Image (spheres, grey):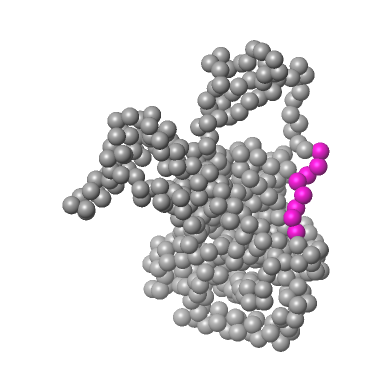
Amino acid sequence: MAVCVRQSRNNIINLVKSKMGLLGLTNLSSSVSSLNNDHITLSTASLAKDLRNESSVFENKPTLYRTRRFESTKPHQRSGVHSNGASSQFLDFPGGQVAFTPEMRFISESRKERIPCYRVLDDDGQLIQGSIDVGKEIAVKMYSDMATLQTMDTIFYEAQRQGRISFYLTTIGEEAINIASAAALTIDDFVVPQYREPGVLLWRGFTLQQFANQCFSNKGDDCRGRQMPIHYGSKKLNYFTVASTIASQLPHAVGLAYSLKMDGKDACAVTYFGDGGSSEGDFHAALNFAAVTEAPVLFICRNNGWAISTPTSDQFRSDGIVVRGEAYGVRSIRVDGNDTLALYSTVRAAREMAIREQRPILVEALTYRVGHHSTSDDSTKYRPVDEIELWRSARDPITRFRKWIESNGWWSGEAESELRSNVRKQVKLVCLN
């Protein structure tokens, strides 16, 4: 009998969801725990009664079915405009009161000053001010994984040039975004990547042998050779398989985040994309979708200055990507993408906000793609070589972070030589298997 009641209850809940669609959202003023408790205490009888009286769905069950935005769509006066006193200076409009003004004033196309970029370490790897809550264990692991990723990229790139694999794409210059963001997440968070985030998989435990299996399309490849090289994926590690289509992963991540929200999970969805991806319609649809559904999703943009051969100056006139969040009602921040500590603290804080407040967060990481876009590209045809070398040497995120862990006494030249030698041997070995 209990089983039948439980099944009936689930059927009714699903029917409510199908009838109400996006109206059946969670109230963000309640915590995840209260969502679970309220969901459990709803009886089958009360839900059936609600179906017969749709208005009670919103009036009596605010925690499960209503979101705070519905309050702003209720006009205080049917005409929409107050006609007495100081209130006549406002239009009562869905979304909140809008002030009237006798002055015709256009909103400027740009701010007077560019949005500042958050950073923790200076170019010499020293703290700019104060301290940072990062211990030795996680700092050393972040550095080791960045160095491992760089070494793997170098050898796999050479393997492609030798004709041993058909295609490859490196993360050189963007290692900090990969590893630091991954370190700030938990394994319960779902990652919906673009194609330049293998470091997130590396951090989560994807082995060098598994990377090689996928790139070489051998019998050990989980995809059985059905995907192009570097199109990794792992159900076990909550890492969705890479798709080549630009920005198509962004709406998927929002839908995933909304599902986590409805299930009351203490987790978020995280999706990555480049500056070029922000020029796709899916980017705009995803941000609006996330804002309206108040989904716990992190949008991490790797603004590396180039969409293959197209510079950002030819892509948009806005101040990068970060300013677009405000237009869609998404909290946003700009961070130094080559500063490992800044990225780690930013993504960690963004994750906490996304889950606690049930909201999307946009992170724009300013970095530079030091390598070619892929093995099908020669970036020296459209970028000055001295510009590339400046970012490769003076602004390398790995060198910068190494200086900081060395200054703390957590790393040494001997440890560096041992790590690099061991990783090279491991990568060459898996390439032979």
Residue nearer the viewer, 194 or 46: 46
* Whole-percent x, y for residue 195 in the image: 55, 58
Residue nearer the viewer, 119 or 337: 119
* Whole-percent x, y for residue 255 in the image: 46, 47
Q: State the residue at coordinates (56%, 48%).
A: 357
Q: How many marks?
A: 0
Asked where in the image residue 80 lies, by quadrant, the reply is top right
Please say whether residue 235 is visible from this viewpoint: yes
Main secondary structure along the magenta-highlighted residues: loop
Image side of residue 276 versus residue 395, left or right? left
Please say whether residue 367 is visible from this viewpoint: no
Span of residues in magenta: 112-119
Residue nearer the viewer, 122 or 194: 122
Q: State the residue at coordinates (61%, 54%).
A: 350
Is 116 a magenta residue?
yes
* Whole-percent x, y for residue 49 in the image: 29, 34
Asked where in the image residue 137 lies, by quadrant, the reply is bottom right
Q: State the residue at coordinates (77%, 38%).
A: 111
Q: State the residue at coordinates (69%, 82%).
A: 416
Image side of residue 246 versus residue 82, left or right? left
